[in-house]
Amino acid sequence: TWGYLAAFEELRRQAEEALGGEGFSDIVLATGSGGTVAGVALGNHLTRHGARVWAFGACDSPSWHHSFIDRQILPFLLPSEGPHVGLHSEDLAEIRNAKNRGYAESAPEELETVRRVAMRTGVLLDPVYSGKAFHRFEQILRESPESFGKRVLYWHTGGIFGLWDKQAELLAMLDSERHGDFLGPGGVAPLFGAEDA
């Protein structure tokens, strides 16, 4: 959590330089135990960056995550007096469920998201955390794009080794792609489906 507090300050400085001080409207990331989202969301709050922080849980419910952050993380980060006393997880972040079939259990559509993002962008999402989170984020973005602002950052927090467990399924998808099953116009694998083009 402390590391993500420091990382947020680095992100804020980079955003000021690259984006002319506008910053991000939304920051989206995966969460497992809650430590990452607690650090990012608290950093966002303390620096008054003003982004809406979205965390997509790969395990447990949003209420579990909020409760855990309130009981096990925030009391050790916040001062015992002053304006931040009484700050709660729900004040800092919107946590949504992304576990789908369960922790480390991938649905075919989640693996398809991992494959598609990798083919289109070169970014590898893992099937345990970042792939589930991005898949659910993408669903909400399609269903209600007004939920997000104009400048959304998806913060990829790692987890590449989770890909090893899903090699067979991902290789089968790539084999299908060689036969043209997944390619869009001009042989390009689209980031979003054809219905979004």
Image: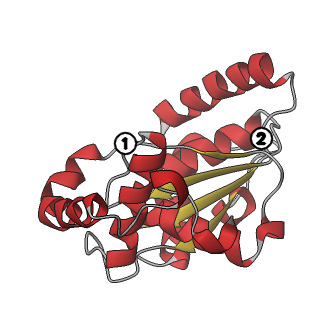
Crowding near pointer 1: few (<14 within 10 Å), some, many (20+)?
few
Task: Pinpoint residue 33: horizontal percent, then vertical percent.
Answer: 39, 59
Colour mapping used in the image: secondary structure
Residue under the point 71% across and 78% down: 143
**Which quarter of the figure has residue 55?**
bottom right
Q: Amino acid at mark 1?
A: Gly
Task: Pinpoint residue 108: horizontal percent, then vertical percent.
Answer: 32, 77
Q: Is residue 34 visible?
A: no
User: What whole-number distance in Å separates the C-alpha atoms at marks 1 and 2?
Assistant: 21 Å
Residue under the point 73% across and 26% down: 15
Residue in the foreground of this view, choosing between 104 and 76: 104
Residue in the foreground of this view, choosing between 2 and 74: 2
Q: Amino acid at mark 2?
A: Phe
Specify the label residue 158 is tagged with.
1
Residue named by callout 2 = 24
Query: Label 2's element?
Result: loop
Residue under the point 75% across and 43% down: 45
Task: Pinpoint residue 42: horizontal percent, then vertical percent.
Answer: 66, 44
Residue in the foreground of this view, choosing between 61 and 68: 61
